[in-house]
Amino acid sequence: MSAGKVLIRIENLAKYYGAGSNAIAALRDVNLTIQTGEFITLYGRSGSGKSTLLNLLSGIDLPTSGKIFVDQAEVTAMDENRLTLFRRDRIGFVFQFFNLLPTLTVQENVLLPGQLNSHSATALRQRGMDLLTQLGIAERWKALPDELSGGQQQRVAIARALINDPQIILADEPTGNLDSETGLHILEILKALSQEQGKTILLATHSLEAARFADRIFQIKDGVLVAQPTQLEG
């Protein structure tokens, strides 16, 4: 991967739950710099702090200490209104359990985040269909989520994450609810988004096979981030 500009900078980030002697460290002294278009893996067991780091980066949760900057804007200093706009415009989310609304069609699920933006209805529908076509799921645009396979649902979720053309995709165990072959296809889609569209991908996973799709791997163990390990520990 060629060098790009710094997009994300994390400085001395820590997150503790509880207080005093009962405090539990979810993350401790995390420092990380990520360039535009990088595919980064946060690798570790369940409970290691991967999801906590994604939640802090998106402003869903607040750190105990430390700072996060995206494009030199301090996310950790934003008020709730600015955070809402930041998440809407700059972040796309992909989850393990898809989080599609069961009563909405494929198309309606994909378009939902875009309806909170200023797109025209016609342009939004066209973008939604273009994304569904790129992801190979356009023929199911009228289907409900429970009429789709797990892999199809995750493709819909990725299209939804992309509808507002965000810079950053946060993928939290996106293959954890899929069989190995389907999971491989989803990882290939994420890799292509990084390489071909310049999206910055942060993938949280406990799967070493998934982790190896990234440009750089960071292991999280007991809340501590280990940069570019030469040997990943289980």
Image (cartoon, grey):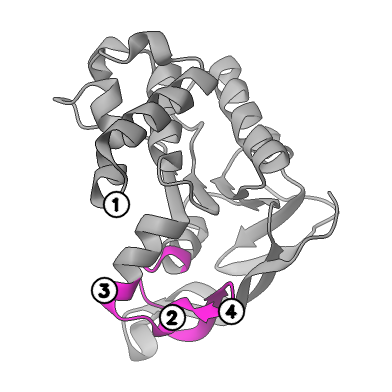
Q: Position of residue 33 (x, y in %)?
A: 69, 70
Is 220 rendered above or below residue 104?
below
Inspect the image, locate mark 1, and give the three-letter code of the amino acid beneath it.
Ser
Cα–Cα span, label 3 and label 1: 17 Å
**Badge 2: how crowded within 10 Å, few (<14), some, or many (20+)?**
many
- Residue at numbered disc 1: 118
**Does dot 2 land on a helix, a strand or a loop?**
helix
Q: Amino acid at mark 4?
A: Gln
**How far across and down, in percent of the image, does residue 78 sit?**
37, 81
Give the residue pinned by disc 4. 72
Q: Report the span colored magenta.
A: 57-82
- Is residue 52 visible in the rendered image? The answer is yes
- Residue placed under numbered mark 3 in the picture: 81
Whole-number angstrom distance, CA of label 2 to CA of label 3 = 13 Å
Asked which quadrant contains residue 190, the reply is: top right
Q: Callout 4: few (<14), some (14-19), or many (20+) C-alpha neighbours within 10 Å?
A: few
Residue denoted by label 2: 76
The mark total stands at 4
Q: CA distance from mark 4 to mark 1?
A: 25 Å
Residue 212 appears in which quarter of the rendering?
top right
